[in-house]
Image (cartoon, helix red, strand yellow):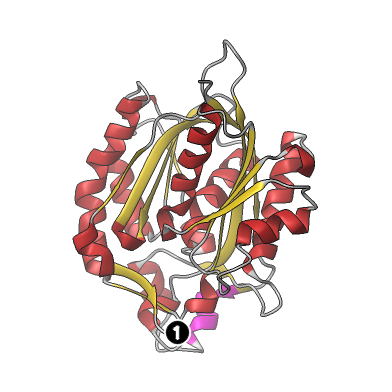
Amino acid sequence: MSGSRITALGHYQPARVLTNEDLAGMVDTSDAWITSRVGIRTRHIAGPDEPVDELAAHAAAKALAAAGRTPDEIDLVLVATSTAIDRSPSMAARVAARLGMPGPAVMDINVVCAGFTHALATADHAVRAGGAHRVLVVGADKMSDVTDWTDRTTCVLVGDGAGAAVVEAAESGTENGIGPVLWGSVPEMGNAVRIEGTPPRFAQEGQSVYRWATTRLPEFARRACEKAGLTPEDLAAVVLHQANLRIVEPLARRIGAVNAVVARDVVDSGNTSAASIPLAFSKLVEQGAVSAGDPVLLFGFGGNLSYAGQVVRCP
């Protein structure tokens, strides 16, 4: 079995920016209240004519271009999302159609905020098992579709966007670029983060998620590093699910990644669910904050309550 690596990343956000001041005109809140509690200042919001698959396709096209690949070279498309309105066609099928792909395998993965890291592990496993050679992995969510904009406890958190990665088989004799995944769930806390009802609405038990994430996740993240044969001190960057700056910053400290750049895209993008990790990672690469070959910890957590993380080499 061969290993796999990420060869390129891409991201996309809608043009409309919603500021904290804008939200203060919609609900009983303020910039000071939002920044002190979640650290978010702005978020991007898609319009009614911008469905999830369009966001995903934009990010995917950028990743393909960065990798120097054409759509017909992809044999598997995985889209991590929890905001698809339709059951079928899947978002992966619609992305493949938008990009003009001739016939890849297509699959959606719904693990909410941990969706991208689950999808990335699935892509790695497919390559290792010989089921795919080149995989397009996308995290895309339109959280504005499932948000109650009169609820100040949730509407201040969310944003829309997409991030994508091209995963390819590692060449013989080269270092594998995607480390073993550490994943699992806490079924008894499954209702702590949810998107349910008709119409579906996002809700969460914020304090329960905060306590669990800041106390349990550091151990899981360190174990993901161990699986990759590294220590937290070896990491060049840490890209956690961008849920809340009050979770991201203390969690990064408790992992012990003292030399790492910590992604803080939540400040500008809000919580974009499955899009948050590839969106933040792609921006770090674009900004030159990390270099090719650098070890980066990706760790997603959230709905179900599920988590998944792995160390990858920066493309």
* x then y, percent, for residue 151: 39, 85
Q: How many marks?
A: 1
Prevailing secondary structure of the magenta residues: helix
Residue 253 place in picture, x, y as percent: 29, 42
User: Where does the C terminus fall, quadrant-wise?
Assistant: top right
> Does the stretch in magenta take in 202?
no
* Residue 256 visible in rendering: no
* Residue drawn at x 51%, y 22% as measured from the top left: 176
- Tell me, yes or no, if residue 279 can be seen here: yes
Image point 73% across, 47% down: which residue? Answer: 103
Image position, residue 211 (x, y; %) = 20, 59
Q: Is residue 211 left or right of residue 233?
A: left
Please tell me which residue is depicted at 69% across the width and 68% down the height of the picture: 15
- Tell me where residue 291 sits by quadrant: top right
Task: From the viewer's side, name the closer residue of 22 and 182.
Answer: 182
Q: Amino acid at mark 1?
A: Asp
Q: Position of residue 182 (x, y in %)?
A: 33, 38
Does the stretch in magenta take in 22? Answer: yes
Secondary element under disc 1, as helix, strand or loop, is: loop
Q: Which residues are magenta?
A: 18-24
Q: Is residue 256 above or below residue 241?
A: above
Residue tagged 1: 148
